Image: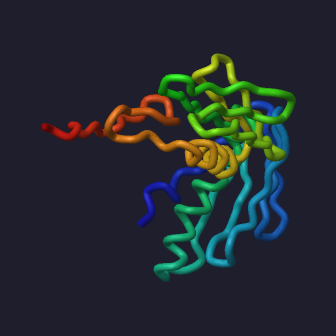
Amino acid sequence: MSRIGKKPVVLPKGVTAEIKGQTIEVKGPKGTRSFTATDDVDLVLDDGAVAVKPRGTSKRARQQWGLTRSMVENLTVGVSEGFKKELEIQGVGYRATMQGKTLKLALGYSHDVNFETPDGVTITAPKQTEIVVEGIDQQLVGQVAANIREWRRPEPYKGKGIRYKGEFVFRKEGKKK
């Protein structure tokens, strides 16, 4: 039995859901998102909550039950509050600035890295050593943050690079004489 799938997703104020077949469309103050569920589950809308029920007891149906419920909850959170990933830059001379829709990163290369902001995501640089990625699609926000981090991952000796806020980087001891 899925513990996650059993709980209905309660829609917060200002958020509406519409189910057409296997597709659910959620509208809120930040935008509109939709998700198409597999044929292994049923989506039911009642009294301001979306319930997910499995069709049968097969392993796939039970897997899709919890997954679909999590996806519907992510849609509601995205259109009501949005998702946010914070990155911090550590290293001498490493910095980030926004120029229009382009994030300019100085990361110790011979040239600055220009990162174009994709549609559906907002990137801001409140300080030279901080980057904030926001949007209504959790997967897209996480992927954009990972793509930015990929330009200079934190290294284990000095800890220089781009890391998620609060991320612990395991430090290694340097070479001994």
The answer to whether any part of residue 52 appears in the image is yes
Where 129 falls versus 120 (above or below)?
above
Depth check: 155 or 133 in front?
Answer: 155
Corner quadrant of residue 30: top right
The N terminus: image quadrant: bottom left
Quadrant of residue 103 within the rendered picture: top right
Residue 75 point in image, percent of width and height: 70, 48
Residue at the far front: name it: 177
Q: Residue at x 70, y 68 (%)?
A: 37
**Residue 154 x, y percent position in the rendering:** 44, 39
Left or right of 106: which side holds 33?
right
Q: What residue do we see at 74% from left, 42% from top?
A: 115
Query: Quadrant of the image for the C terminus?
Result: top left
Q: Is residue 147 above or below residue 39?
A: above
Q: Given the current orientation, which residue lies at the most extreme top position?
A: 127
Which residue is pictured at 43% across the width and 57% down the height?
Answer: 3
Q: How many marks?
A: 0
Quadrant of the image occupied by residue 83: top right
Could you say where residue 117 lies in the image, as x and y percent from the top left? 79, 41
Residue 59 x %, y %: 46, 79
Quick one: 125 or 42, which is closer to the camera? 125
Left or right? Give the position of 85 relative to 111.
left
Q: What kind of colouring is applied to the model shown?
A: rainbow
Q: Is residue 173 above or below residue 18?
A: above
Question: Residue at the location (32% across, 37% down)?
Answer: 157
Q: Is residue 73 visible?
A: no
